[in-house]
Amino acid sequence: MAVSSTQNTLASNRQAAPVLSRTQQRFERRLAKILVHATDVFYDKGYEGASMRDLARASGMSLSGLYYYFESKEKLLYLIQKHTFSTIVERLRERLEQLSDPEQRIRIFILNHLEYFLANRKAMKVLSHEDEALKNCFGAEIAAIKREYYRICVGLLDDFKRARKLEFSSRLAVLSLFGMMNWIYTWYKPRVDSGAEEIAREMGDIFLKGIGAPRAKARKKKLAVN
Amino acid sequence: MAVSSTQNTLASNRQAAPVLSRTQQRFERRLAKILVHATDVFYDKGYEGASMRDLARASGMSLSGLYYYFESKEKLLYLIQKHTFSTIVERLRERLEQLSDPEQRIRIFILNHLEYFLANRKAMKVLSHEDEALKNCFGAEIAAIKREYYRICVGLLDDFKRARKLEFSSRLAVLSLFGMMNWIYTWYKPRVDSGAEEIAREMGDIFLKGIGAPRAKARKKKLAVN
DNA sequence: TAATACTTTGAACGAACGTTCGAACTTTTA
DNA sequence: TAAAAGTTCGAACGTTCGTTCAAAGTATTA
């Protein structure tokens, strides 16, 4: 079997033909295993800091053996990021279909993000932290998914604004929310911090109250005088 | 002149004796210049991705010439992070001394952070993004400053909680706030986004309203039934 | 001006890097 | 069971990595 083409890797395509021969299935399964181990290594050492030899050791495979499954280190990172990001967007879409209340939709967005983040912490760190590591085509494709995800969130916020007749910058609100959520990879400790549901509720409270209540007025000027 | 000891580099110590000979002054000045150029390179390529040869080129100096000013690549990153972090903490302390109102103190914390962040974007990205790059002693020292900074913020929040008789997790609130603010290095575009004051005001609004208003009650259960 | 201290450099070090390749091994197919 | 297809590997490729060092160059001091 030749090194797999870009298509169908990890079965991330939606349309048509999941007809894979037994050998193809095995190939995909082995590749997925390698991706898991590679994620561990990237999580610990960063993309630049991790060597192909590190990845080989973690996968229990020879250095050259890895190249049977993907053609470069960059492609490996791409596969990890693509799969991770696609999955989180896919799950979000499924969950959003079942809700119509604007606040609930934002809350489910937050919950989906944090649940997936904490259940796949290493992959999500690799996705968040190695944002600029991919160049050209690979980078562009991940950036496109990111833009798509961002747009979904802006849409949710705009609906919320309309429903509540609020006025604020969606861009800043969305980016603040992403910051709140994504930063979690720098501090989360399973032994110390609560689970995804509770954190999602608390962050949701902060964020929704933060953008929801009418803005306090005329205080700044008064205090500036003192 | 021997390669400088750890002490007094960048004149970041508060106590005593800023008595530097003219040659020592020149040394510090040149080192500072190198640090600025190195910050540019780390910003663009990341710590691991940047080579000493890149740094030499950016500084307009020979590869070996760099080693006259610092003994390793790691130390260089340490110097950048130490100086950046120390400065932001120092400025914060000065500004906090002049305020007593708990809300104003949180707002000035946010403003200080964002002002410094946007005025020193590259250095602050290197500080935020290369959090785990330093090992052992160097890493421990930066981590100590970070903990100190974190503790200050927790203190501000606890004061606010007491003043307003609020109940929420300071840890989660502080880390959410840091996320909001630090994530800015991934998205800020000077041409598109407003300045530090406005962003600080808007993030301050979100955060303070988010933690300030009484928590909405009994809604979750009702909605969960539907 | 001679001696001393400070600064910069080119050349080189061994180690580690990502990647390639042909041969060997294993599984599937005919 | 022989041929074909799929899989793994050791060895090596050329390059780049961080760091060192003796020598040369420049400024300061006596």
Image: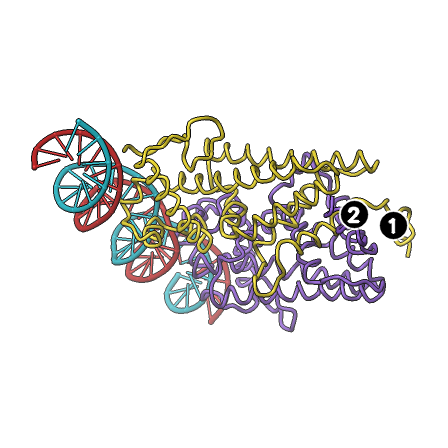
Chain colours: A yellow, B purple, C cyan, D red
Could you tell me how far apart the alpha carbons at marks 1 and 2 are, in whole angstroms?
10 Å
Left or right placement of residue C11 versus residue B56 in this view: left
Name the residue nearer the viewer: D25 or B71. B71
Chain hosting mark 1:
A
Tell whether label 2 touches label 1 (CB within 8 Å): yes
Name the residue nearer the viewer: A93 or B165. A93
Q: Residue A117: x percent and y percent?
A: 56, 49
What residue is at 46 percent from the left and 45 percent from the top?
Answer: B60
How crowded pointer 2 is (Cα within 10 Å; few <14, some 14-19, many 20+) is rated as some
Name the residue nearer the viewer: B91 or B177. B177
Q: Is residue B178 above or below residue A191?
A: above
Q: Residue furthest bottom?
A: B16
What residue is at 52 percent from the left and 54 percent from the top?
Answer: B130
Chain hosting mark 2:
B
Residue topped by disc 1: A220
Residue topped by disc 2: B201
Q: Is residue B136 above or below residue A102?
A: below
Q: Residue A10: x percent and y percent?
A: 42, 38
What residue is at 81 percent from the left and 35 percent from the top?
Answer: A163
Q: Amino acid at mark 2?
A: Arg
Left or right placement of residue B53 versus residue B31 in this view: left
